[in-house]
């Protein structure tokens, strides 16, 4: 078995679709001889032409030189027979995502390439170990999962199968680095790093929608403007397409033997059946046919002119809430109990307003909740309880808008919107670290590059406060009884000891 990437001169790519085409482009640009093959007639030739057009555009924009352009064109070769891959030192498979088809291909390659050739699969959701199981040398098989579009998505997951030789993964890490990509190393587990870590964003948003806490538009706006995501979860589902997203949800859920943290939603299942898939069908959660179904805007109520009483129960949220109402010019009471006419404000972590009302003996009709997890920065979530006077709630919303911030009025929920979604994301990331699927640092890097999240989930948990995230999860678990919210031991232990979520066992604490 080879131990140096210097031995790799020729790289074979099987599959000339979007992924294979992208991998071929970056490998040829990096100086490797690339042999591109596809079983469909002319598919590889057409892919080669498309790649050359991309290089021509790069040349015209001076992103590559004329010399680099010419060298890349010469490096890319189309082959008409899989037998011509015999001289390759590395073959990357990028074909249909079906286990039996991939295993059959690798068995074919076994009979063609030398025993020292590395075989890599670009699978996004199948077991590398299962793919390698049908080969004569499973130790030389590994995962090399790029993301679409390959030239722009700079992260690549290098996955060790159960029997993969450690030296092979190291070679693939070097190869990936030479193509200008950032490799992150992962164990062979469902979803690897990025698709695994991405389970929380959409699934928790769907649960919030299913519980009728907020509309999908409200959820998207809150997650963009309060949490900083580029796309709201439903905008993202529409962009990806439910024909892609929903099967991945189901696959990871079943591969983890019905782990509640990854539970799919009946909402997306129904939409798949109906063919309402997103942008590609012209209709998803949003309409893309040109006739946008814009919701009616409720009549603006005058701002609340009376006093505001803020519960002291959540002491660490109090400064942010006081500053918020000061910006609005509100009259804030400072008594232990509210006056008979004051609007009462609570700010629970992982609890609903109803629970706060019952525990503190407040007047439910005039009590609302505000999410203070992000210190009341950005878009605000104002939460009613079932008994809240709707007119009072609308007046409080108008008052808060004087801060210059957007305000969404939502229904009672344990954990608001931001709390639930971010806590779920951070908890899943913590469990990835607990399972040792990858290093905490690689996890955060992969999520930022692969999912374009505003921050890595573990670093984000540190910023928000691990003890707060733990409290949100414990209260969600206690309120719902749903094991999807049970905190990961990784999170619990670091919160208890005041350690960073990026802290490794045995590492010196700072």
Image (tube, helix red, strand yellow):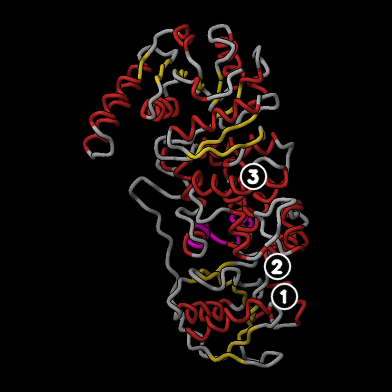
Residue 210 visible within the image = no
- Of callouts 3 and 2, the N-terminal one: 2
Q: Count all numbered tags in the image, as a single digit.
A: 3
- Residue that label 3 marks: 439
* Left or right: 282 in relation to 272: left
* Left or right: 65 in relation to 10: left
Q: Main secondary structure of the magenta part?
A: helix
Whole-number angstrom distance, CA of label 2 to CA of label 1:
8 Å
Q: Tell us which disc is closer to us: 1 or 3.
A: 3
> How far across and how far down the image is residue 6, in percent?
49, 23
Secondary structure under the numbered disc 2 in the rendered image: loop
Instruction: Tell me, yes or no, whether the two marked residues, 2 and 1, touch with CB atoms within 8 Å.
Output: yes
> How far across and how far down the image is residue 364, in percent?
68, 79
* Left or right: 282 in relation to 351: left
Q: Magenta part of the protein: which range?
A: 207-222
| Image mark for residue 480 | none
Instruction: Tell me, yes or no, whether the two marked residues, 1 and 3, touch with CB atoms within 8 Å.
Output: no
In the rendered view, would you say 130 is above or below 368? above
Whole-number angstrom distance, CA of label 3 to CA of label 2:
32 Å
Q: Tell us which disc is closer to us: 3 or 2.
A: 3
Tell me if mark 2 has few (under 14), some (14-19) or many (20+) residues whose alpha carbon lies within 10 angstroms of its own: many
Tell me if mark 1 has few (under 14), some (14-19) or many (20+) residues whose alpha carbon lies within 10 angstroms of its own: many
Secondary structure under the numbered disc 3 in the rendered image: loop
Tell me if mark 3 has few (under 14), some (14-19) or many (20+) residues whose alpha carbon lies within 10 angstroms of its own: some
């Amino acid at each position: 078995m080879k131990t140096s990437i210097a031995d790799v001169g020729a790289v074979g790519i099987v599959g000339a679709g979007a992924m294979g085409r992208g991998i071929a482009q970056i490998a040829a640009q990096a100086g490797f001889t690339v042999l591109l093959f596809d079983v469909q007639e002319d598919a590889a030739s057409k892919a080669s032409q498309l790649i050359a057009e991309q290089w021509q555009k790069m040349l015209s924009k001076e992103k590559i030189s004329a010399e680099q352009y010419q060298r890349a064109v010469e490096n890319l070769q189309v082959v008409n027979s899989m037998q011509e891959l015999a001289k390759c030192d590395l073959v990357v498979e990028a074909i249909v995502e079906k286990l039996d088809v991939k295993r059959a291909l690798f068995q074919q390659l076994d009979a063609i390439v030398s025993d020292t050739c590395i075989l890599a699969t670009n699978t996004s959701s199948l077991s590398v170990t299962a793919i390698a199981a049908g080969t004569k040398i499973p130790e030389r098989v590994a995962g090399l999962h790029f993301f679409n579009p390959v030239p722009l998505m700079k992260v690549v997951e290098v996955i060790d199968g159960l029997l993969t030789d450690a030296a092979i993964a190291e070679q693939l890490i070097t190869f990936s680095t030479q193509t200008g990509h950032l490799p992150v190393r992962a164990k062979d587990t469902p979803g690897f790093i990025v698709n695994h870590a991405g389970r929380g964003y959409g699934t928790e948003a769907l649960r919030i929608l299913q519980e009728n806490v907020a509309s999908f538009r409200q959820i998207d706006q809150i997650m963009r403007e309060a949490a900083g995501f580029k796309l709201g979860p439903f905008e993202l589902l529409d962009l990806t397409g439910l024909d892609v997203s929903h099967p991945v949800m189901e696959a990871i859920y079943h591969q983890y033997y019905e782990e509640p943290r990854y539970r799919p939603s009946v909402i997306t299942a129904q939409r798949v059946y109906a063919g309402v898939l997103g942008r590609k069908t012209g209709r998803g959660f949003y309409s893309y046919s040109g006739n946008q179904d814009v919701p009616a805007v409720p009549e603006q109520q005058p701002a609340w002119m009376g006093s505001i009483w803020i519960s002291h129960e959540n002491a660490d949220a109090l400064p942010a809430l006081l500053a918020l109402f000061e910006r609005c010019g509100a009259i804030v009471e400072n008594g232990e109990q509210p006056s008979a006419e004051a609007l009462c404000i609570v700010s629970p972590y992982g609890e609903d307003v109803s629970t706060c009302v019952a525990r503190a003996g407040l007047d439910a009709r005039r009590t609302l909740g505000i999410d203070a997890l992000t210190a009341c920065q950005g878009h605000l979530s104002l939460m009613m309880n079932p008994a809240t006077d709707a007119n009072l709630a609308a007046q409080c919303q108008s008052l808060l808008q004087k801060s210059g911030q957007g305000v969404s009025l939502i229904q009672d929920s344990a954990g608001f919107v931001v709390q639930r979604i971010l806590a779920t994301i951070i908890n899943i990331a913590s469990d990835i670290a607990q399972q040792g699927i990858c290093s905490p640092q690689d996890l955060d890097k992969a999520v930022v590059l692969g999912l374009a999240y505003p921050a890595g989930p573990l670093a984000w948990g540190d910023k928000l406060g691990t003890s707060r995230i733990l409290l949100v999860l414990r209260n969600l678990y206690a309120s719902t009884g749903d094991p999807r919210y049970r905190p990961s031991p990784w999170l619990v232990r670091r919160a208890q000891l005041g350690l960073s979520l990026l802290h490794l066992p045995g590492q010196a604490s700072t």
